[in-house]
Image (cartoon, helix red, strand yellow):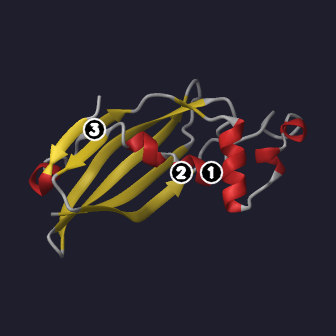
Amino acid sequence: MTITVTGLEEIKLLAGRDLGRSGWMEVAQDRVDTFAEATDDHQWIHVDPDRAKDGPFGGTIAHGYLTLSLLIPLFTELLEIRGVTMSVNYGLEKVRFPSPVRVGSKIRLAGKVGSVTEVAGDGVQMLLDFVVEIDGADKPACVAQAVYRHYA
């Protein structure tokens, strides 16, 4: 269920709040191939299913940065912010990829608001703790701390 807040004061109240989990998203080979085209990263472990089946992962895997980029659509399932003039992705504090995402597997996002602080220009900065889980796996695909800013 998506949490909806309106304005900076309601955003501030999110500090420390668990945002829950998104729905599952399958990571298909065509998405990996499209990402490879967009980034010019055509390493065989990502785009050559025949060669990759005999490789270290038993098949093709998603690029780590593809997994990271999927935070965007998955996060929109967790939180909707209204009543602000602008929201920006301000960056990342820390990112790790503990486990590869095998093509055909499903991932979802678990999110928690770590902190919310005021910033210049009538805004707030949110530090979010994200974990990208892989269906049936012991280790997550990605653990990241993201920074977002929202302005009145």
Q: Which residue is mark 2?
A: 68
- Closer to the camera, 71 or 14? 71
Q: Nearer the viewer, mark 3 or mark 2?
A: 2
In the drawing, does residue 152 fall left or right of residue 51? Answer: left
- The x and y percentages for residue 27 are 62, 35
Measure the alpha-carbon separation of dots 3 and 2: 20 Å
Circle 1 sits in a helix, a strand or a loop, which is it? helix
Residue positioned 40% across, 32% down in the render: 22
- N-terminal of the two: label 1 or label 3? 3
Name the residue beneath numbered marker 3: 18
137 sits to left or right of 117: right
What residue type is disc 1 on? Gly
Disc 2 crowd, CA 10 A, few/some/many (<14, 14-19, 20+): some
Q: Nearer the viewer, mark 1 or mark 3?
A: 1
For label 2, the SS is helix
In whole angstroms, how far apart are the C-alphas of marks 2 and 1? 6 Å
Quadrant of the rendering where the N terminus is positioned: top left
87 relative to 75 in the view: left or right = left
- Residue 66's x, y, as percent? 60, 50
Please report contact status of discs 2 and 1: CB closer than 8 Å, yes or no.
yes
Residue furthest toward the left? 9
Q: Which residue is mark 1?
A: 64
